[in-house]
Image: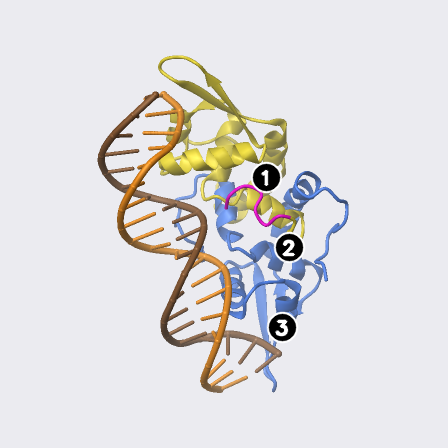
Chain colours: A blue, B yellow, C brown, D orange
Amino acid sequence: MGTARRPGAYVCGIDAAMDVIGGKWKVLILWALNERACRFGELRRLVPGVTEKVLASHLRELEVDGIVHREVHDEMPPHVEYSLTSLGVSLNGALAPLGRWGRENILGGAENTHHVPR
Amino acid sequence: MGTARRPGAYVCGIDAAMDVIGGKWKVLILWALNERACRFGELRRLVPGVTEKVLASHLRELEVDGIVHREVHDEMPPHVEYSLTSLGVSLNGALAPLGRWGRENILGGAENTHHVPR
DNA sequence: CAGCATCCGCCCTGATACTG
DNA sequence: CAGTATCAGGGCGGATGCTG
């Protein structure tokens, strides 16, 4: 993990993509941001179990990889909004079939069609 | 990683799927087996860089998860063939869009349409 | 509120050697 | 050929505390 690692050593498109989404919580972050832009604290609540440090580092990696856009509003108290770039949106689209597969074959329910749980 | 971990703690289908393909070499193994059934030694050559130990453990996890079928021919010398189950085939299908995304957005070429490189 | 700094620990991964 | 056994290392993730 860590943003554009293995420079050119990718064997196929899938392991290249896996490298981008390979963090423990990244797909959950992607999923959360798919609905709407979020602030840091929101994301922390939407991704249950993640710590501040890991969330911050994952967000930074996703930002460097061009998946996530980070917008700083210069206020007090601080206000930062994270949102998907168009690349992030397309990534999420490419992830959708995998999500469906997991829901149908690992889980079993029909719940959780698209959005992040509460 | 290790086969049906986080019992029921999945938040959505994607992280459930990620848990199945979360090993460092698993998608490459899947990709290789998508073409044809393979013996252990073949896989080792088709997945460049993987060690015997890790390949064996990944294959075992994929087997327990119902993705890979392991068939032992009782001969001398030993002969074991690995192939995808129908679940594995469907997983690979769900992985295809992600592979396309990675190829188009991380790599850049049009090579590597589907099969594992030499 | 949105982080960074530091320390720590575990699990995954890797190298090597050996066996049925 | 197809693994297992053993040992070792590293990197990712986790907990806590502090700052602008």
Which label is found at residue B69? Answer: none
* Disc 1 residue type (three-letter): Leu
Magenta stretch contains residue B39: no
Identify which residue, B8 or B107, lies in the foreground.
B8
Name the image quarter holding residue C16: top left
Residue A39 visible (yes or no): yes
x and y percentages locating residue B34 in the rendered image:
54, 28
User: Disc 2 or 3, which lies upstream in sequence?
Assistant: 3
Span highlighted in magenta in the image: B1-7
- Left or right: residue A37 versus residue B30 is right
- Name the residue beneath numbered marker 1: B95
Instruction: Output the chain of dot 2.
Output: A
Q: State the residue at coordinates (63%, 67%).
A: A43
Q: Are marks 2 and 3 in contact (CB under 8 Å)?
A: no
Q: What residue does disc 3 label?
A: A41
Residue at image coords 49%, 61%? A61
Q: Is residue D4 left or right of residue D16?
A: left
* Cα distance in 3D space between marks 2 and 1: 17 Å
**Distance of mark 1 from mark 3, alpha carbons?**
32 Å
Q: Position of residue A17 (x, y in %)?
A: 52, 47
Q: Are marks 1 and 3 in contact (CB under 8 Å)?
A: no
The quadrant of the image that shows the C terminus of chain A is bottom right
Left or right? Give the position of A96 relative to A25. Answer: right
